[in-house]
Image: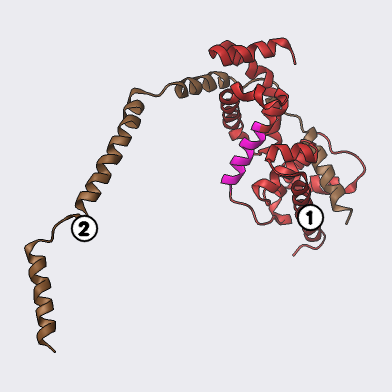
Chain colours: A brown, B red
Amino acid sequence: MNDPDKLLQRLAAATRSDGDPYADELPLGLATRVLAKLREGRAPTLWETFALGALPVAAVITIACVMLGSPETQPPDDADVIAQVMLETELTTSR
Amino acid sequence: MPSTLLNDIADWVARRDEEAARRLMEELHPRVAGIIRRHWTRVEEWEDLEQEVFMRVFEALPRWKAEGAPLEHWVSRIAMNVCRKRWRTMSRRPEWRWSDLSEGEQQAFLNARRDDEPLEGIETREARSLMHKLLDTLSADDRLILSLLHLEEKSLEEIAQVMGISRIVVKVRAFRARKKMHAALQRLEGEEKSPP
């Protein structure tokens, strides 16, 4: 085969030289769309401001609920205590 | 750089002057469009890519002067990185077979192999399509390196700056990526000469 690098260079040269009218004029409406998106991104909406501000509060409430709901923070109820005693008693008498 | 361009940049940065932004887009469009056209084959996505490039340019324009790069280079870097980001979303093609190529691409291959006259006219369009098919088989970073090297004709130093890696790494990756391209071209030639 011809040197593959030469072939690659020739394909690259052809790619570089490929002209296209797209490059000459800014497509219709493109500038307007870009500016509209930039305006959208400029200031947060009222909803976004509220949502972002509420996030720390929601996080604190979630953590508090998790901690209060954890078994270690709850005193065992009567049923648990009785079950534990029965298990221990059975083991003792089975010896 | 023309002073009008600097004034438009200053007007956008200071007051987000939209007329200044429009003039900047008209000024930069040929460069941005040329890069997108050379590096992305799907015509229907060119405008979308260009929109993304300009969004990033205008958002980052307040930082341009501090970075110290010429505006055209800085904008080119943004355009190439937008293309790289889009390449990463594509699934890589493992390889192309001779029968996968269109007739035009096959003819462009044969004409390029003849090594006498440069490709012209419609052949350049087919050669571009073939080149992109071959680049599709590379990773996004390898594709960026070879695209900058062969299609944008950037130096190793410039490529290293665009990618934020050392010149040595660029050189090694370029060598390996070129070897893959050579292997792909040799495979195509083998299939062309001896069809399965």
Residue where numbered disc 2 is placed: A72
Callout 1: chain: B
Q: Is residue B195 visible?
A: yes
Using the image, determine if residue B131 lies above or below residue A48.
Answer: below
Bin the neighbour count of mark 2 within 10 Å (Cα to Cα): few under 14, some 14-19, many 20 and up.
few
Subunit under mark 2? A
The kind of residue on which mark 1 rests is Lys
Please, what is the three-letter code of the amino acid marked with disc 2?
Glu
Q: What x and y, as percent, mark residue B56? A: 58, 28
Q: Distance between the residues labelled 1 and 2?
A: 63 Å
Q: Which of the two residues, B98 or B150, is positioned nearer the viewer here?
A: B150
Question: Furthest-bottom residue in view?
Answer: A95
Q: Considering only vertical position in the picture, is A41 above or below B177? A: above
Q: Where is residue B189 in the image (x, y as percent from the top left)?
A: 81, 57
Please identify the quarter of the rendering in which residue B6 is found. top right
**Which residue has dot 1 on it?**
B179
| Residues at circles 1 and 2 in contact by the CB criterion of under 8 Å | no
Q: Quadrant of residue A20?
A: top right
- Rendered position, A62 above or below A24: below
Name which residue lies at 56% across and 13% down.
B14
Q: What stretch is highlighted in magenta?
A: B78-90
Q: Give coordinates of residue B94: x percent, y percent.
A: 65, 57
At mark 2, the secondary structure is helix
The N terminus of chain B lies in which quarter of the figure?
top right
